[in-house]
Amino acid sequence: MSSIIRFMVISCVACCFLLAGCSSEQGKQKEAHVGILDANTYRAEILAVEAVLYKASPASLDDFTRMAAAMTDLYESIQARETHLIKKDAANRILFLTARADAGSDVGYALPNFADIRADWESTRFDVFGEADWFHRAGDALVVAQTPKVPKPDAGEVYELVRVIERLEDILAEGQDECDDLGEPEYDPERMDSRGHSQVAGWDQFYRDWDEQLNQIADRLPPQPSWSGDQDHVTAYQEVNQAFGELRLVAVGAGMWPTPFRYQWEQRFDAAEAHLAEARKRLGEQE
């Protein structure tokens, strides 16, 4: 056998081994992407989930409810069609995601976001259904489209809320002076004398006048911002309302005493001041 022929034989054998190795690797790669269940069997149910999960706009709370319903349909379809224990057990992965999606409709003060549940879905989809050309995938454009848009507060409502804060701060100092003048209880609540009745009457009049001032200021409060709105605005509004709550209690006594002690009204004024300061901070306002 000539050297040329021998070289050709060796080359052919090497190519055969190389091709066999490539085919083997491709087979392994293809096998790694085969899921537990056939994706095409559940195409309609999967696409119903992905119609919500891959929509090109930010998520809403209703979207999570719709997604949970679609995942429930997928889970029930698997349970109804499959008889093999391993395949039926794969449906439990979908059931777990259904609970996650349903919980997504209760996000407290956070803006709803598909990012976490979408990552979980893609991981579960890969394991359970393998790969399919018609699966949706989250590209950069979709991520940008789904990024929650931070709402901006209404400038007019913020302005009115700041004016309310300023008015409360104005009367707060006046109220402290009036409470100091009226003084702590100087009477025995079980044996009231004329001096005690006079002091209680003074506090009663202060309470009516004070409450009326607070009502007039409260009438200037702008509408309560939406819970899904700018969170600093929402929190500032809550702080102002808590300040109102503290100030309405400054003339209220405790136990047998119908009028307050100094520590009581001072604590309430201090708490109101703290709430108003936090509201200013949230709104980016300086005193």
Image (tube, grey):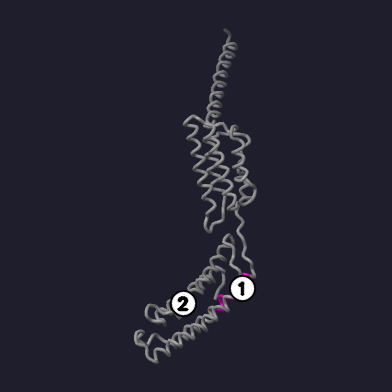
Question: Is any part of residue 237 visible from this angle?
Answer: yes
Q: Choose the circle earlier in sequence order: 2 or 1.
A: 1
**Residue at 61% in and 60% down:** 151
| Residue 1 vertical position relative to residue 25 in the rendered view, above or below | above
Say which residue appears at 55% left-offset and 33% top-offset. 130
Circle 2 crowding by C-alpha within 10 Å: few under 14, some 14–19, many from 20: some
Magenta-drawn stretch contains 168: no
Instruction: Identify the amino acid type marked 1.
Output: Glu
The residue that mark 2 highlights is: 249
Measured along the vertical axis of the image, is residue 178 above or below residue 228?
below
Residue 279 at what x, y percent from top left?
53, 70
| Quadrant assignment, res 53 | top right
Quadrant for the N terminus, please. Answer: top right
Does the magenta stretch mainly form a helix, a strand or a loop?
helix
Observer-nearest of 223 and 279: 223
Indicate the quadrant containing the C terminus: top left, top right, bottom left or bottom right. bottom right
Residue 256: x and y in percent read: 37, 80
Mark 1 — residue? 160
- The amino acid pointed to by label 2 is Leu
The magenta segment: 157-167
